[in-house]
Image (cartoon, rainbow, N blue to C red):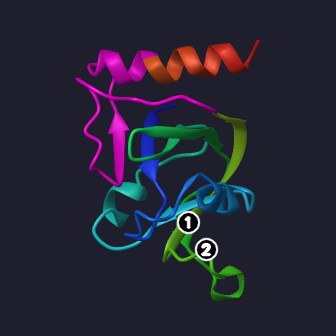
Amino acid sequence: MNYWHIQLHPNKMNWGVEEIRNILSQNLIGCSGKPIAEFYKIQKGDRVLVRHGAKVIALVEVIGSPKTTPESIKNEWIWFTDCCEVEVLAYCENLSVKGKGWYLPTTLQQIKKSNETAHSFIENLYNEISK
């Protein structure tokens, strides 16, 4: 099981929390373009911190393998070419990440154990919501 962080806006920084939650309400995460190669490394059981800039929106668990997004499910929220099914474990309020260990401009990044700051943040968040 691996940890990741992802941003889900299609280069529209004017999208806010509600727009990202609309994507998550369809139990999907995804991306397009350059991050796709990294996206296909995500596996079932991985946990993904969904964020918008430094703002934490949700923690999800991957329940389906990455795949090409079927045209039949694309809509104003499902804009990405590739997706995977997720279960939303928790929506977060008033939570943000910053500083060492968080390369925030990145659309998608795996969080290795060597990145103690980010790894322990997600681990602690998961433990807190699992109580």
Q: Residue at 58% across / 76% down in the picture?
A: 69
> Where does the image place residue 2, in percent across and percent down from the top left?
46, 33
Helix, strand or loop under label 2: loop
Q: Can you tell which quarter of the image residue 92 is in?
A: top right
Q: Can you tell which quarter of the image residue 115 is in?
A: top left
> Where does the image place residue 121, in percent across and percent down from the top left?
45, 19
Disc 2 to disc 1, how far (Cα)? 9 Å
User: Residue flagged by tag 2: what amino acid is it?
Assistant: Ile
> Where does the image place residue 56, in percent across and percent down from the top left?
51, 37
Q: In this view, does 67 lie to the left or right of 110?
A: right
- What's drawn in magenta, residue-wise? 93-120
Mark 2 or 1, which is nearer the eye? 2
Q: Residue at 49% across / 59% down in the picture?
A: 8
Q: For label 1, count other residues whose C-alpha is less than 10 Å away and answer few (under 14), some (14-19) or many (20+).
A: many
User: Which residue does the numbered mark 1 point to in the structure image?
Assistant: 83
Identify which residue, 41 or 30, lies in the foreground: 30
Q: In this view, does 63 lie to the left or right of 39?
A: right
Identify which residue, 111 or 58, lies in the foreground: 58
Residue contact between numbered discs 2 and 1, judged by CB atoms under 8 Å: yes
Quadrant, the C terminus: top right
Q: In this view, does 112 lie above or below 37?
A: above
Q: Is residue 87 above or below residue 82?
A: above
Q: How many labels does the image show?
A: 2
Main secondary structure of the magenta stretch: loop
User: Which residue does the numbered mark 2 point to in the structure image?
Assistant: 78
